[in-house]
Amino acid sequence: MGYQTIEVRKLTPAIGAEIVGIDLARPLGNQQFQEVHDALMENLVIFFRDQEITHEQHKAFGRRFGDLHLHPTSTHLEDEHPEILVIKADENSKYVAGEEWHSDVSCDAEPPMGSILYMKELPPDGGGNTLFANMYRAFETLSPPIQRLCEGLTAIHDGAQVYGGRFGQTPKAGGFPRNEHPVVRTHPVTGRKALFVNRNFTTRIVGLSRTESDALLDMLYRHSETPEFQCRFAWQPNSIAFWDNRAALHHAMWDYYPHRRLGYRVTVKGDKPFYRR
């Protein structure tokens, strides 16, 4: 794909690209927006280095791609910026966000389209990388019989086991989100099929016994985490990652305890997952 207003440098053949020649503190023109969008669709996660943006500029960039999502928990900069989710870990952390492979808030009825993480503080000696995995490749490399099996299934995604279980957070009115989604979803833009289960939120495949569900999910998780489907991003201060939650999983490495890591995330609303042959 040709680009005129940006330079796109692929990280791996499977997933990930660094975008060069853009200042996200400035509003995107229509062509530049379209090229950034196309780069995201092509690479599933795109990265920007050396960006100096305010919370308002962060939100404005996210809004070019859609309305902003509000996280079901309350760790926001709520007074002025409820759309900004704080991502942090320090010497007092017992768990950190994202240390299992997952798609953000897949427990929602309409899971997010994408997430935009702006990293401000990092451990002094490295670490804190984020891994991303291509779920198109995960589906396409399954054997045809397993593909056909998965295409007819749906699974439960439950926020309670993450937010209420590991993090002990208090649910808002109505409890944590819990919804049923197809195991294989069709991407609404590309039309490609992607696996849509993850260790964080997916609890059970509908219609299977617990033993059958656990066995199939474990196989799909391990297959999804195949290294050849992945890229690994080494953060620097003022780096940004923008990933497509509909077709990519990610995993945040917590290899820097007791040091501090701090970032801010804006999340773009998505639509209800569907499967189309």
Image: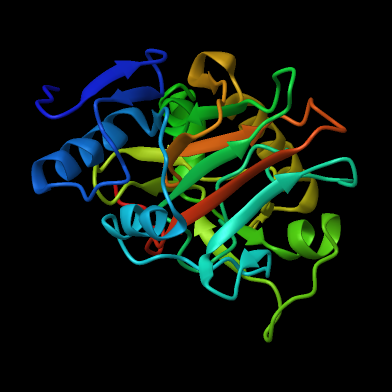
For the rendered model, the colour scheme is rainbow
Residue 74, above or below 217: below
Could you say where residue 62 lies in the image, as x and y percent from the top left? Answer: 36, 55
> What residue is at 79 percent from the left and 74 percent from the top?
170
Could you say where residue 240 lies in the image, as x and y percent from the top left? Answer: 46, 36
Residue 58 left/right relative to 78 = left
Nearest to the observer: residue 77 or residue 202 = 77
Q: Quadrant of residue 257?
A: top right
> What residue is at 73 percent from the left and 23 percent from the top?
124
Nearest to the observer: residue 189 or residue 73 = 73
> What residue is at 79 percent from the left and 25 percent from the top?
255
Q: Quadrant of the N terminus?
A: top left
- Residue situated furthest bottom in the rendering: 173
Nearest to the observer: residue 27 or residue 73 = 27
Q: Is residue 206 visible?
A: no
Could you say where residue 225 lies in the image, as x and y percent from the top left? Answer: 61, 25
Q: Quadrant of residue 175?
A: bottom right
What number of labels is visible?
A: 0
> What residue is at 10 percent from the left and 48 percent from the top?
30
Residue 65, above or below 233: below
Q: Is residue 269 visible?
A: yes
Residue 53 left/right relative to 264 = left
Residue 163, above or below 223: below
Nearest to the observer: residue 12 or residue 20 = 20
Residue 16 left/right relative to 133 = left
